Amino acid sequence: MSMSAARILIIEDSPSIAQTYAAILEGAGHSVTLAETGADGDAAMADAVKPFDILLLDLQLPDYDGLEWLEARPAIASQSAVIVITGDGSINRAINAMRLGAYDFLVKPVAPPRLLTTVRNAYERQDLAQKAETAQKLAGRESFQGFIGKSAPMQAVYREIENVAASKATVFITGESGTGKEVAAEAIHKAGGRAGKRFVAINCGAIPENLLESELFGHMKGSFTGAIADRKGAAREADGGTLFLDEICEMDLALQVKLLRFLQSGMVQPVGSSRPEAVDVRVICATNRDPAREVAEGRFREDLFYRLNVIPLDLPPLRQRPGDVGLIAQAFLERFANEEGKSFDPLSPELLQELDARRWPGNVRELQNTMRRVVVMTPGPLLSASDFPTERVVIAGEAVGNAFASAASPIPSPAAQQAADGFGVPMTLAEIERRTVEAAIARAGGSVPKAARELDVSPSTIYRMQARWEKADGLS
């Protein structure tokens, strides 16, 4: 708050006195609303978008005794700083006003310096109280718009989402795979003014390059082989709402040019059409790669990066969120137990400590998959560490999980990698396929295209596999 933004309601039945107060306060930069009766005061507060910062209340009104009016409305003193002004200077009325929550008690006639000083002090105290209340609410949140977590890094994420939600600016979300980038995009959409319109998500890496333009901007019937009908496209479907472009760094350079033109002009031109159309969308994009590095290595246009990176939002990995693993695991346990018709005891402190010690390279998604598997495979009601898959192996002196290794880890020996991939135990062909692909992605530092080149398949093949696995895990 700033003092110039103070909103003051004066309830005073003497027009001359009310106008004098208003002139003094407006001269100091305050905004003033006048009411002559208690009923007028009620109407002014009902019409206000939010509670007044300060209320100047005369105790002798035509329709109310001021103290009785205040006593009948206990919420007012908690929402606004109430300053009682009266010609009756009895100490009993002063005490009663304070008991009802009034900040101060002034006796007519009030000297302008005293009025300004009292208003300033009341407003500063109100400002501090509101900031403290807001901070307390923020610090205490254990969930927010689909996220679960009360750690300091997540509190910062919640505040950033709230700050950017009302804006029209483009948001660029970064973070490791499984940290909840689409959850963050939807949270921004739901917390802003576009919540009533559509949220449309496109995974730029899961769609073949020759079809992505059509998916984004639409096409006209007959514009290419297979275009048997007009297609609206994601940008036009999201008109008035939000368009989320996931894995934006996987987009072909030629299409990046068209995306930049769309962002600059707000015009969409479907494939096969000669007539561009205006759309109103907020664009949010995301990647699990380092976009600055992609620009430096020539895989992502610099001008597009700066056009998208208006508001950066980086999501912390699960290993950097102290205390959140237990909250998330317990929430998933309750959710999946309900879905499976089972009953489980709350996770024990010992088990929570064990789970918190793991690296969780796949972040929240990996923890979610793990909890679902445990719920399905364990009768319950009590869970122990033995019910969870062995997650830690030591490779080149560093603890890593399953087939995942950090991008900075040394390349393990074939024997060590085989142990890490879990190939020392019987598995189905589907399990071998999944672990092989996930191990390749881990070695590629999370880059699906790099993993695809290593495995000699197209990136879209891996994305389809991941979508199939997520559906099988119950994440679709």
Image (cartoon, rainbow, N blue to C red):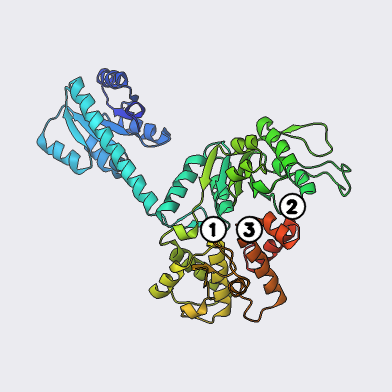
Q: How many C-alpha atoms fall within 10 Å of the one at disc 1: few (<14), some, or many (≥20)?
A: few
Q: Of the residues tagged 2 and 3, which is closer to the observer?
A: 3
Residue at the spot of label 2: 207
Q: Of the residues tagged 2 and 1, which is closer to the observer?
A: 1
From this view, report whether residue 227 is shown above or below residue 41: below
Q: CA distance from mark 3 to mark 1?
A: 10 Å
Q: CA distance from mark 2 to mark 1?
A: 29 Å
The amino acid at mark 2 is: Ile
Determine whether the residue tagged by mark 3 lies in a helix, strand or loop.
loop
Please tell me in which quadrant of the rendered image residue 93 appears. Answer: top left
Q: Which label sits on residue 408? A: 1
The amino acid at mark 3 is: Ala
Q: Which label sits on residue 172? A: none
From this view, report whether residue 197 is shown above or below residue 7: below
Residue 469 on image: x %, y %: 67, 66
Question: On the rendered image, what quadrant is the N terminus found in?
Answer: top left
Q: Which label sits on residue 444? A: 3
